Amino acid sequence: MIFITSDHRGFQLKKHLLTYIKTQLHKSITDLGPKTYNKEDDFVDFAIKLGKKINKKKKDIGISICGSGHGMCITANKIKGIRAIVGYSIEGAELGRKDNDANILCLSGNVLSNDHADAIVKKFLETKFDGLDRRVRRLKKISALEK
């Protein structure tokens, strides 16, 4: 399952991506909010909600959008089992999934155009973790820090 969330600075891009993912990529996606624009909301609340949802089922994927993508990423990575990356490029999103088994893609609502965000999301969703021994070993070391 794919889940998406944003704060006020990512709200418009989130609305766009919901439509893109459903109509162009033909994938099911669940919006975790906010449902309406609120310039006083806090990215932290939505990043926590997404991180906890993704952590329940290890195969789920999340997309979070704030002004820079950084706040969502920092917050999500505080949750055990989350491997969030900031997606500023198609190549970076691909490497984050393939090499690091990233499970949340954080995007910038301030910087990315709709077309660039579409391409980044598409690559993130179509890329699978390659599972090479050295990468699994590294992920185990990262997971050990969470204990």
Image: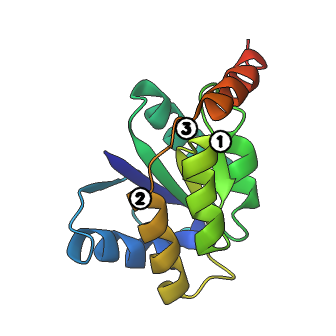
Residue at image mark 1: 76
Residue with the mark numbered 3: 51
Picture disc at residue 123: none
Instruction: Say what secondary structure mark 3 lies in.
Output: helix
Which quarter of the rendering shows the C terminus?
top right
In the displayed structure, does residue 40 sit left or right of residue 130? right
**Looking at the image, which residue is at 57% across and 35% down?**
132
Q: Position of residue 77 (x, y in %)?
A: 70, 38
- Could you give the CA–CA distance between mark 1 and mark 2, rounded to whole angstroms? 18 Å
Which residue of the protein is positioned furthest toward the front in this rendering?
133
Residue 10 appears in which quarter of the rendering?
bottom right
**How far across and down, in percent of the image, does residue 18 sit?**
34, 69
* 37 left or right, relative to 25: right
Picture layout, residue 8 above or below residue 147: below
Question: Judging from the image, what secondary structure is the residue with disc 1 in?
Answer: helix
- Residue 4: name its quadrant: bottom left
CB contact under 8 Å: marks 1 and 2: no
Say which of 118 and 14 sits in front. 118
Circles 1 and 3 in contact, beta carbons < 8 Å: yes
Q: Nearer the viewer, mark 1 or mark 2?
A: 2
Q: Which residue is mark 2?
A: 125
Q: How many marks?
A: 3
Q: Secondary structure at mark 2?
A: helix
Marks 2 and 3, the one that precedes in the sequence: 3
Residue 39 can be seen in this image: no
The numbered mark, 1 or 2, whose residue comes first in the sequence reads 1
Identity of the residue drawn at 59% across and 39% down: 48
Q: Residue flagged by tag 1: what amino acid is it?
A: Ala
Looking at the image, residue 102 lies above or below residue 64: above
Q: CA distance from mark 2 to mark 3?
A: 17 Å
Q: Of residues 50 and 131, which is closer to you in this image?
A: 131
